[in-house]
Amino acid sequence: MTLPRLSNSPPTGSPEPVQTGVLVGGKTPEPQACVSFGLRALQIINKCQPIIERAAGDNADSQSMELLREIDELKRKYCGPVLLRAHSRHRRFSLTNDSKRLLKQWFNEHIEHPYPTQREKEALAKTASLSLKQINDWFTNYRKRHWEADLVDQQCDLADLH
């Protein structure tokens, strides 16, 4: 069985250089689109590799072997830490319920002025097993999203008691 060639470049020798900043559809592609494209291409390569290996079997011809070598080279070159770092920058991690409960408790106890000191942040970070950046980000976001509503709710609760 002969495998179709995937490009017009010869199967041996150095591949043609890839141009960067090439216009696609009249505009330069966004960096995230390039990362997404690269990840999808690697997924396809990972699906194709076992098929090529099975098709080649014990009597693999030079074209199959060259294709498998190119796949290995691409995976070594592009599956490294640079691509993983680029992809991981955009991941979201949720805090655990226990961490959120601890932070909300502190927030509600200091509703009038929910700005922890540096020492309080460090203590919260240690207790909640979070980084200082996560603590800072959580307080910034929570104040923006909930502070006014929580303060009004608490004042309403106090008015109901009197």
Image (cartoon, rainbow, N blue to C red):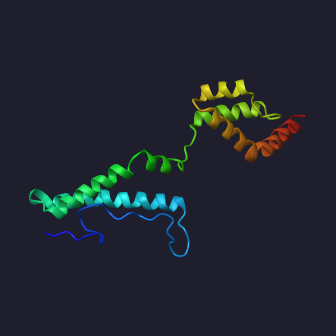
Q: Nearer the viewer, residue 115 or 73?
A: 73
Q: Nearer the viewer, residue 44 or 97?
A: 44
Say whether residue 57 is left or right of residue 21.
Answer: left
Q: Quadrant of residue 147?
A: top right
Residue 30 percent across, percent down from the top left: 55, 63
Give the vertical position of 77 relative to 117 (above or below).
Answer: below
Residue 129 percent across, percent down from the top left: 57, 29
| Residue under the image location 66 percent in, 24 percent down | 123
Question: Residue extending furthest left?
Answer: 59
Q: Is residue 51 in view from this perspective?
A: no
Figure quadrant of the C terminus: top right
Q: Is residue 113 in view from this perspective?
A: yes
Give the vertical position of 30 relative to 150 (above or below).
Answer: below
Say whether residue 162 is left or right of residue 123.
Answer: right
Q: Nearer the viewer, residue 37 or 132?
A: 37
| Residue under the image location 82 percent in, 40 percent down | 151
Residue 116 percent across, percent down from the top left: 74, 30
Residue 19 percent across, percent down from the top left: 44, 65
Figure quadrant of the N terminus: bottom left
